Image (cartoon, rainbow, N blue to C red):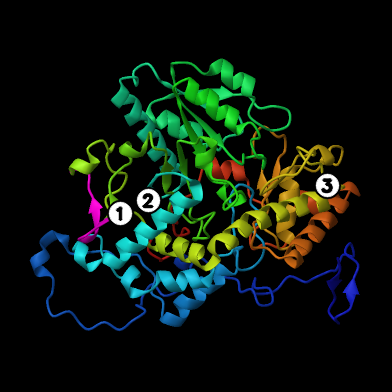
Amino acid sequence: MSTMNTVGRPTAPNQVQTKPATLTGGRGLLQNEALIFEGDGWGKTGVDLPEPKTDGSDLGDLVRKDPIGLPGLSEPETMRHYVRLSQKNHAIDLAIYPLGSCTMKHNPRLNEKMARLPGFSDIHPLQPISTVQGALELMDTLAHWLKTLTGMPAVALSPKAGAHGELCGLMAIRAAHEASGQHEKRRKVLVPTSAHGTNPATAAFVGYSVVEVAQTEDGRVDVADLASKLGDDVAAIMVTNPNTCGLFERDILEISRLTHEAGAYFYCDGANFNAIVGRVRPGDLGVDAMHINLHKTFSTPHGGGGPGAGPVVLSEALAPFAPAPWVVHDEGGYRLIEREEEEAEQAFGRLCAFQGQMGMYTRALSYMMSHGADGLRQVAEDAVLNANYIKARLGDLMSAAFPDGPCMHEALFDDEWLKGTDITTLDFAKAMIDEGFHPMTMYFPLVVHGAMLIEPTETESKAELDRFIEAMRALAGAAKAGDVDRFKGAPFHAPLKRLDETRAARSPVLRWTAPEGSNKAA
């Protein structure tokens, strides 16, 4: 890789150039932007408001006596503030987002256009059913295709995230055991060591004790260990497939058989469904419940605390216990089955106040319909192809955690190749920021020491993958060549330099306060 000097000629990658610090803190097109509370404007408002017609005397002691404590910005100032802040963030619209186990992929603008149609975006959950027939039809259609793609007879749409979906699945399992009179003795949930952290947390939240299942040397569930721990005290197992190591559980049918023989249910974490969608139906594998992250497999926006959606598909055994509400279609049109109705008498209850996240439903169905059956099959094929391309191109410089055979949707490396360099996984990840790339997932899964988990997703082109790979190869070469300073202080070119992440996590500063001597409101 080369850089360009001030006259446009390439410079060697290791040639250090002296760059004077700017006088404003800005750098080229990147403006130096303070926090909104640190700017001027405390004595103004961004818009002109008419003088109030009353004096507020009827408010008694509720009248405000101190400044309101909000800065005033005009419309251009507001727009520039947030645009400048956005330039300090990495985004999927800027470059590849290689977080493993997260499927951070492109969100097609067609989906956004559909979600903003007034008939979907401007409705209210308390409207009469007769006025939202189109929205209910969309939900019913989405449910149909989720059931078709998974080979499952029922789906609960209302869960709002993957972990919320896990809660839904385990509560349905608990309701099923309660109905059969076995809940009091079935108090354990088996979870592999490589599971997503939400799996054991959800099981504990529902009231189960969690028993860990070992992993084999090739990164899969140890079936013998699983069999030894199954018994009439086990309510369910929770297995991710493809798993968190980026591998398909080749013994999945045996896992399912053993689980059902023991009278337990099989919960599958479907976070990685994009690796098998259109190719494998989880229902055919014996799965009883599985959440589907619409923000992963079906391209709805991901991150930032929501809104999200994590529908749960259910087997015939668990379908009667699905949470209300759900959509039915009869001679009177579309309607919602609620908790109090006879048709929902076995439902374990509700997971949210209304029907779930309409915007996510619209985006996901738009994605499905624009791809079609063949396109969704290609989603899985391209996700697996891209991950294996990265594994093959980086395998000579970086150590794959499980080198034998292909991976699925993500390539997993460990830190064995960094031994003797005095450079850690964290150092390497921070140096990626200087090269313009968001770091991969670090130190997860925990079963791999110094893990570097890379998921390119199916939406990245070969050209973009090659750009990412060449940067990774250049960094790996620098690490092996002993260029420690490049890594230990990184990132050097980011708006903020390296933070003390442990201190930030343990002692976060959650409230801005004005500096001493400042006349700005706190």
Q: Residue furthest left?
A: 58
Q: CA distance from mark 1 to mark 2?
A: 8 Å
* Tag 3 near tag 1, CB within 8 Å: no
Q: CA distance from mark 3 to mark 2?
A: 41 Å
Magenta-span inclusion, residue 204: no
* Residue depicted at 40% across the width and 66% down the height: 520
Residue, disc 3: 395
Q: Amino acid at mark 1?
A: Gln
Secondary structure of the residue carrying tag 3 is: loop
Q: Is residue 457 above or below residue 69?
A: above
**Which mark is nearer the camera, 3 or 2?**
2
* Tag 1 near tag 2, CB within 8 Å: yes
Q: Is residue 147 above or below residue 288?
A: below
Residue, disc 2: 157
Quarter-of-image position of residue 377: bottom right
Location of the C terminus (image quadrant): bottom left
* Residue depicted at 17% across the width and 64% down the height: 63
| Mark closest to the chain's N terminus, 1 or 2 | 2
Q: Amino acid at mark 2?
A: Leu
Residue, disc 1: 355
User: Residue 39, image x and y in percent?
Assistant: 48, 71
Q: Is residue 132 above or below residue 149?
A: below
* Residue depicted at 36% across the width and 35% down the height: 172
What crowding class fits label 3: few (fewer than 14 Cα within 10 Å), some (14-19), or many (20 or more)?
some
On the rendered structure, is 391 left or right of 268? right
Magenta-span inclusion, residue 335: yes
What is the magenta range? 329-340
On the rendered structure, is 425 left or right of 331? right
Secondary structure of the residue carrying tag 2 is: loop
Q: Is residue 69 above or below residue 501?
A: below
